[in-house]
Amino acid sequence: MILWSHHQPPVQWPKWGHRPTAGGKCLFPARLLPWHSRLLKTSACLQFKLLARASGSSARAGTLVTRHGAVRTPLFMPVGTQATVKAQTQESLHESGSQILLANTYHLLLRPGTEVFRAMGGIHRFMSWGGSVLTDSGGYQIFSLPHSRSMGEEGAVFQSYLDGRSILLSPETSIAAQLAIGSDIMMVLDQCVPSTVDRTTAQAAMELTHRWALRSLTARGDSPSALFAIVQGALDLELRRQSAETLCAMPFEGFAIGGLAVGESKSQREETCAFTVALLPDHLPRYLMGVGTPLDLLEAVHRGVDMFDCIIPTQVAQRGGAFTSRGFLQLRRGVYKTADEALDPACGCPTCRTHSRAYLHHLTKCKETLGWQLIGRHNIHFYHRLMDGIRGAILNGSFEAFYRSQRDILAVDDLDNPVTPMRRNPPRSLSLGAYRIHTAREGFSSILHVSSGEIMHSRTAPMDEARALYIDQSRLSSRLLEAGNPEPLKIWDVGLGGAANAMAAIRCFESAGPSLRPLRIVSFENDLDSLRLAFRNSDLFPYLRHGGPAAILKSGFWQSKSHPGLEWILHEGDFLELLESADPPDLIFYDMFSGKTCAPAWTGQAFERVMSRCAGRDVELFTYTCSTASRVAMLAAGFGLARGRNAGDKEETTIAFTSLEAAMRRGRDVLGLDWLARWERSAAQFPPDLDPPAREDFARVIRSRPQFLSRHRTCGTSPAA
């Protein structure tokens, strides 16, 4: 294992309370006070001056002075992970108006290594960049590479993707690496977790982040580089308050809001951002990490944020996407094949001055690097012009009007060549085959299976239930952000029905921004009439106004052109006959009709075959049922079980898993002895076709499942007769 030398020997860190002040007196440990006072007196490493505030908004404009010059805020920082912004030159970045570039400590630690930066005199000389540099600490890699590292109080141990060496990334090694790199602004090492995790997980990560922040301060010593702390706490506002109070009592030169844009909705992100910003010091810069689109930046500035970074401008450029004053353009579209006009008529960047949309379309279709470079240059220029416009509006008192007008423009797609929406077909018939459209009293439509009377999504709108029960519970957004795994994340969508679950997964991928992992959805359905009926009445099922369902009904396959890495496959026929032909899954959305209507799909034998296809993988299965019979069938097949969230009229649902350790790590509410005791008394204790002589052996199998075994000896229950 490679360990970098620390500036000071290890110490026993004091526990840090959530209330850092009392009676106006600072509660820092005594050893912290001497250099804390020195930092307050010698803050020349970074100076921040607030120049103006917007009326009716929390937006503000200021000046940030680092060792490499003055920086105007609010500002956007292009991401140069490996000491380079992808497909851009330093000259183009400077001409576009870039003031600070972001580099990643973890990646630069592995290659070229800190010894190169020491030899070259730091990153500025190494990459020939005269502006400022901010280095991320490597905390995002702790989040995005969960399968390639192990976590502990000391830090995170990674396996190098270059040569397989074990690398310890601790607060001390991260700061030592950033000092060698020579950045103007350093970030403390933090533990970022998905924003939707449970409170216990979020609190543990937050408290570890606080302890690491204190260690980072000590390791920083008398460095002339500024150091920012990172407020964590997921979506729990009370944890965010505790984190801000604790960190704001420490002598940092700025504060970042971390743990957002990692799984939450746009409204959740904006609410949490606004709440957290209000807790941060007014006289220091505020940085929202990893966000986002131009509209995201506008909304965050409105809520009081000063600094941003994101890979979106260059990543969408690689796929032919351009942000313009005429909306978001996808240059792969055939409408641009002969478009002899500037990319953005209101833009003065070299790309728009020199090249036509037709040429950029050609380069994109040919996958030429020059297309990526030219569109990326424009996008970065667009981001900087937006921030300049925001700053100017704040300074001249017109931000409120600017915000309203830009919010409308930034939210739309191509104004000149809008994508033709799918034609709304009038309902030809409200029934097809075995199905009929059902309208709930709440006003939404769903599909009714006539002979059984079962309704798909009877109490909740189809997409609302799909998102809550399958997308949010599986934390799909966070899984798609996992880096370092080129293999697609595979979802088995068992029981396609009206395609709400599949479309919810597709929408999740499309709205996740720059996804780091491909997604493959494999749907199973033996009767497509339910989807055909919903598709023909797309005015009642608007989520089907998308290219995916039409392609699935036509050919059984769809691959996204606008979001590379996203594909959807249909296996038409009986699930139990087809499951062997599908690749092993990572997630299973098990949404078949109930055991009364579709009994073979809910037997122990069916789940044994599903378990066999999981092939030792870490797989989670999500389903709407909480029936004892279904749960016993899953347990008998080898799955572990946890309680899922409520859905419609069901107080709870079910999560099945193949790895108890992984389920505990994810904070699942694993079924315990209380459920086992209820099962012992249940009338559905055994499968109906199980012979009485075999019941004792069956009961022994259930009781021996890992989630019960360690506790069952003391539970006091006796086997059923």
Image (tube, rainbow, N blue to C red):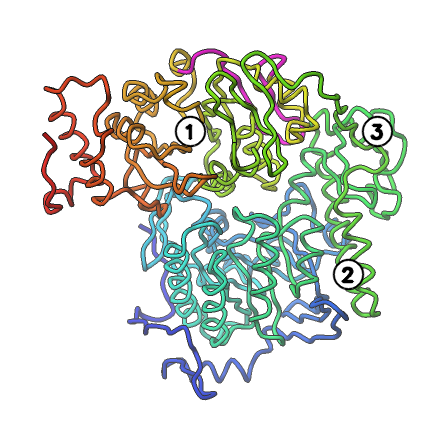
For mark 2, give the secondary structure. Answer: helix
Q: Earlier in the sequence, mark 2 or mark 3?
A: 3
| Residue type, label 2 | Ile
- Front tag of 3 and 1: 1
Q: Observer-nearest residue: 383 or 45?
A: 383
Verify CB contact (< 8 Å) between mark 3 and mark 1: no
Instruction: Count how many numbered circles sit on residues in the image.
Output: 3
Give the distance between the C-alpha atoms of the residues marked 2 and 3, in whole angstroms: 31 Å
- Residue at 10% across, 34% down: 719
Between 624 and 281, the one nearer to me in the picture: 624
From the viewer's perspective, tell me whether residue 60 is left or right of residue 340. left
- Given contact means CB atoms under 8 Å apart, are the residues at marks 2 and 3 in contact? no
Q: Secondary structure at mark 3?
A: helix
Task: Estimate how packed mark 2 is, as few (under 14), some (14 to 19) or many (20 or more) residues with alpha carbons within 10 Å.
Answer: many
Disc 2 designates what residue? Answer: 390
Report which residue position mark 1 lands on.
588
Q: Earlier in the sequence, mark 3 or mark 1?
A: 3
Left or right of residue 684, residue 410 in this image: right
Please name the residue shown 22% across and 36% down the image. Answer: 679
Q: Which residue is mark 3?
A: 358
Q: Amino acid at mark 1?
A: Ile
The vertical placement of 606 against 280, above or below, is above
Residue type for callout 3: Ala
Separation of residues labelled 2 and 1 (CA atoms): 45 Å
The correct choice, above or below, for 136 with respect to 432 in the image is below
